[in-house]
Amino acid sequence: MIAVVYSGSRTAFWKLTQNGQVVAHCNTSGINPTFVDSKMLLQILNKKVVLVNNAENIKKIYFFAAGASSPDRKEELSKTLSSFFRYSKVFVEDDLFGAAKAACYDKPGIVGMLGSGSHCAYFDGKKPLKNNFGLGYILGDEGSSNYFGKMLLKDFLSEKLPADLEAKFIGNYNLDRPQILERIYNKPQANIFLTSFFEFFTQNIDHEYIIKLIDSGFEKYFQTYILPTVERYGKEDIHFVGKVASELEERLQLTAEKHQLKIKTIIKEPILNLLKHYTN
């Protein structure tokens, strides 16, 4: 049995296969080694009956996780997974590697990630090449769901939301200033809290304020990530991976067209392509 796992900071998608066929699947909370330590990871795994029941049957795990970018974090994550899946060989890479493989397989291209976080890299057909992106939800992540959540909360707290959207926000979330600031500054996993407001954007996608906020976020993303990558590597095929890219595809395509660029593919769930690649 082979397990393929793709984890953002919010959700981890698990697919278990036998002889090329999916025999079980489940989702867990996100497994980002920046925020999830070994003890917490084992708690997450032990809560899933599917994983507990199949732990000894899995012989290989291909695990792609947000935050698994350094050798130390990869090693720690691999060690903890090996202690739970005792008979399995574990291969750990970061989510950018997984996104690049899902989008390009073994061909070169530019891969943009727009999900709970954001990133971009040139993929040479074997690995994403190193760059200075990936600064996380505090210093970076332009155009991601936690970025949009941050902008929404900032305008709400500054009383800059249009009246109709303010009423909807209060009705949907019933949050006040002290609760929001407490959740962001004094509680763990503030990044997950910020991503939880993304549905507000999809629910109000036709509102002028929402459109302007999305377009502004995508423009910052292109200026920070895509345009420097295109300038360095040329107009290679551009691919996008992630929920934000998929659900806001129309606005993303318009931003690309503004810069005379064309997006070749947009993949919402990279786990499906990774499954084909690693189990065939």
Image (tube, rainbow, N blue to C red):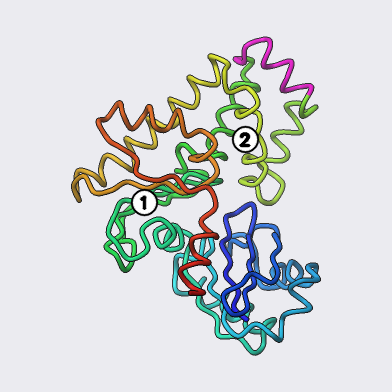
The residue most toward the top is 163
Camera-nearest residue between 34 and 171: 171
48 over 113 or under it: above or below: below
**Left or right of 215: which side holds 28?**
right
Q: Amino acid at mark 1?
A: Val
Q: Is residue 165 magenta?
A: yes
Left or right of 65 on screen, residue 230: left
Which amino acid lies under the numbered mark 2 shown in the image of this protein? Phe
Q: Is residue 130 left or right of residue 117?
A: left
Element marked by disc 2? helix
Q: Is residue 136 above or below residue 176?
A: below
Query: Is 167 inside the magenta-drawn segment?
Result: yes
What range is drawn magenta here?
Answer: 160-171
Give SS at disc 1.
strand
Residue 194: percent from left, percent from top: 63, 39
Say which of 219 and 188 sits in front. 219
Q: Residue at x 49, y 60 (%)?
A: 273
Look at discs 2 and 1 and give the one toward the viewer.
Answer: 1
* Viewer-closest of 21 and 218: 21
Residue 66 percent coordinates (x, y)? 53, 59
The dominant secondary structure in magenta is: helix
Residue placed at 29% from the left, 61% from the top? 107
Identify the residue under disc 1.
111
Residue extending farthest to the bottom is 87
Image quadrant for the N terminus? bottom right
Q: Residue at (63%, 59%) from the top-left corner?
A: 12
Q: Which mark, residue 5?
A: none
Task: Give how far across and how far down residue 153 sits, in percent.
Answer: 63, 28
In-front residue for pair 23/122: 23
Labelled disc at residue 198: 2
- Residue 198 position in % (x across, y down): 62, 35
How far, Cα to Cα, is label 2 from label 1? 22 Å
